[in-house]
Amino acid sequence: MQFGVWAPRAREVELVLDGTGVPMRRTDSPRPGWWSAEGSGSRYAFRLDGGDPRPDPRSGWQPEGVHGPSAVVEPAQFRWTDGDWPGRDVRGAVFYELHVGTFTEAGTFAAAAEHLDHLVDLGVEVVEVLPVSAWDGPWNWGYDGVAPYAVQHEYGGPHGLAAFVDACHARGLAVALDCVYNHLGPSGNYLAEFGPYFTDKHDTPWGAAVNLDDDDSVEVRRWIVDNALRWFRDFHVDALRLDAVHALVDDSGRHVLQQLADETAELSRELGRPLGLVAESDLNDAVMVTPTAQGGFGMDAQWDDDVHHALHAWLTGERQGYYADFGDPEVVKTVFEEAFFHAGRFSTFRDRVWGKPVDRAAVPGTAFLGYLQTHDQVGNRAVGDRIGHLLPVTRQAAGAALYLLGPFTPMVFMGEEWNASTKWQFFTSFPDPELGKAVSEGRRGEFGSHGWDAEDVPDPQDPATRENSVLRWEELGEPAHARVLDWYRTLTSLRRELPPFTDLRRVRVDVAGNALVLHRGDVRVVVTLGEGADVEVEGAPLEVLAAFTDGPAPELLGEGVRTAAEAVVVLRVASPA
């Protein structure tokens, strides 16, 4: 078996194979700075210039944790049954954001797979899995990973991920994997010992930036791109969600995202199935989803937090922080018709003009993911409260109808579909007591500066914080939760039946007081906030497709609908008899 590692500045490198040292020779192949050795074994590490053994920067499995030796992984040994899986273009599909560690009490891929039929019944088409790359400790959101190629052992390791993807494909579900390339976690990151994986040329919120444009950056970029292609090729993943790409600082002539987009397209042609790239970006710039041939970054879609902010602030009345410019129904109108609110407008939160207008003739609405909740927007609240903890259920139902029947690619956050009672809180499980203490004090100090009592903010290191975030599947049998679940299923069913309007030009929103009407083809989504209202709706006669209200059923008028309480009503313009 051939072992290799990139360590361009090392004087000598030793392969530690099942505890035995094997000298490596510098081959400068496949590129300068590479070392090679042959051997036979299952656990291995590398010793640089006589130092401590370190795990492989391209390790696929860390069964003894991120500080221990790497384990050999042979993708050819995965047992696949998805040979007939055609793949799918994820644009316009219903996404479902899932965290393996809290989706079930067991927190494993195998346990999550037991609930895939629920997702199929819900109308989900793409399962977006939060990061699984190995971190220090058993439980974590996944954004503290330090071994991007390895699959967290507690989740089931690489074989567990492969089996989960296979199970999804057997049910017609595509899989998107959340990948973090903009930083590494605070414990178990040994990359700098191997080579210039980081640079002081740029700063990021996490310290030194990943080296994308400094000396020896060619190999670091290769490390990122090869990782992404590996998920597609070896694990049959259908799409990647790329975390905070605005923090991938790259001043080279060809941005690493462009390189990744072009190589992904090439692999897609080779494999004969669609491969998607979805970026999280706060730049509010459609250049992210513009093809590389036109000077763009080549992503298929990007998260659109303006959709969330517009709906959340309007429905809840919250105006703190980045919600400052949101809350008016006219802002909802702008976002649904134009994709961004901050598109060359002044951002109070950022204290500057932000974003660029979207060319609605060129960019479809499905290039933007819209949502009412995400792991960030729930978990980064002080106590991890969901939208259902903040609102009457009718208002959550209204927000769901707008984004699920709107022009965007919709995404449901796990548990949202039945208004889960559990919160989703920020948790870690770092074994190092000093690091754990620093994380706990930092979290509580952050929210203490915003007026929260530190004791009210859950301790990330307390095992109960993770346990309190685990979904309670028994709630599905309770009438109040079942009612919400039935509403979400109704909405996804209607979405499948609607004409495929993906063009922002075909979307219109009318605002009258605190009532809003979303026009999509011959369908109208009417939302009324308040004691009730008469709402005019263009196009008659009308028929009610679905309604959610805690008051009397809505009444059809000659040219609209009457509600006696807060309500959301889905109407169709009926053909005259």
Image: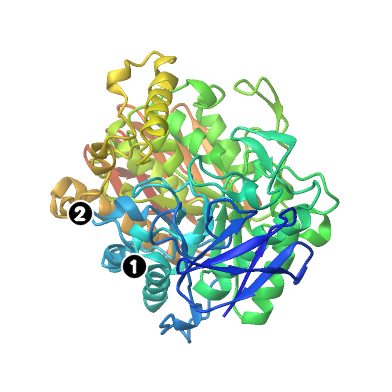
The label number, if any, that marks residue 239 in the structure image? none
Q: How many marks?
A: 2
Q: Residue at x 46, y 43 (%)?
A: 537
Three-letter code, disc 2: Trp
Badge 1 marks a residue whose secondary structure is helix
Quadrant of the rendered image containing residue 208: top right
Q: Residue at x 39, y 65 (%)?
A: 157
| Quadrant assignment for the N terminus | bottom right
- Mark 2 sits on what residue? 473
- Mark 1 sits on what residue? 120
Q: Is residue 90 visible?
A: no
Q: Nearer the viewer, residue 473 or 464?
A: 464
Mark 1 Cα shell of 10 Å, populated few (<14), some (14-19), many (≥20): some
Mark 2 Cα shell of 10 Å, populated few (<14), some (14-19), many (≥20): some
Three-letter code, disc 1: Val
- Residue 62 higher or lower than 253, as above or below: below
The x and y percentages for residue 303 are: 56, 47
